[in-house]
Image (spheres, grey):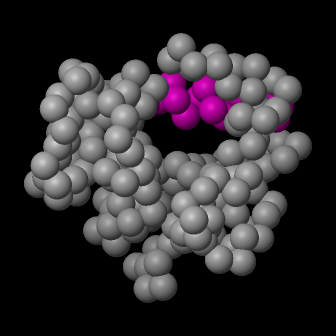
Amino acid sequence: MMGFSISLDGCIASTEREDAGLHDWLFAGGTPVEVAGTRFMADSAQSVRVFEEVVGALGAVIVGRTAFGEGDEPFFDLPTFVLTTREPPPRSSDKVTYVSGGIERALELATAAAGAKQVNVFGGASTARQYLAAGLVDELRLTVVPILLGDGLRLFGPDPARRTAEIVGVVPAPTVTHLHLRLK
């Protein structure tokens, strides 16, 4: 599974790699929700329901080194696998594993750690495009934000593999629309 907040023109961040308002639905609303010890302020009960459903299904997370940053905290207190080609920092969390063996190796490790739950390819754009191009993504959870950024970090590359998707669910909320798609 892969999930992102995305602009109408397909960006998941600005050209400066900034949020550009794409996550306001989860951080700047008036509806509180607590997940894995972190309090969020969603735009609505509909968004809370979708967010809780997505996070509740997760068993492990894969993220690229740039998107993970220099922190050492696992996402949602779950096993977090960080793709890297650089020397990893000293290990400070038993839930964060740096993987230098490529996307397939990271998926193998994350799948084992997730058990019966889902693995989420969390980001960034380069990592997401690699998994999509390799055909290793079976579901997309896209939160479509009605913003045109004009330019930015695009989720889908210029030559994505042609695939169709089945619409599993659509949840409208006051500031976004949540799409759940199953890729074929």
The answer to whether residue 119 of the structure is visible from this angle is: no
Q: Is residue 155 above or below residue 168?
A: below
Rendering coords of residue 28 (x, y %): 78, 35
Q: Is residue 123 magenta?
A: no
95 to the left or right of 38: left
Q: Residue at x 52, y 49 (%)?
A: 3
Q: Residue at x 68, y 45 (%)?
A: 23
Q: Does the magenta stretch mainly form a helix, a strand or a loop?
A: helix
Q: Is residue 162 above or below residue 50?
A: below
Rendering coords of residue 111 (x, y %): 24, 38
Front one among 134 and 41: 41
Q: Is residue 49 magenta?
A: yes
Rendering coords of residue 137 (x, y %): 38, 57
Q: Residue furthest right?
A: 174
Q: Quadrant of the C terminus?
A: bottom left
Total number of numbered discs in the rendering: 0
Q: Residue at x 75, y 43 (%)?
A: 24
Rendering coords of residue 166 (x, y %): 57, 60
119 to the left or right of 109: right
Q: Residue furthest bottom?
A: 159
Give the magenta range.
43-58
Which quarter of the figure has residue 181? bottom right
The answer to whether residue 158 of the structure is visible from this angle is: yes
Q: Residue furthest top?
A: 37
Front one among 9 and 171: 9
24 to the left or right of 165: right
Q: Residue at x 38, y 45 (%)?
A: 69
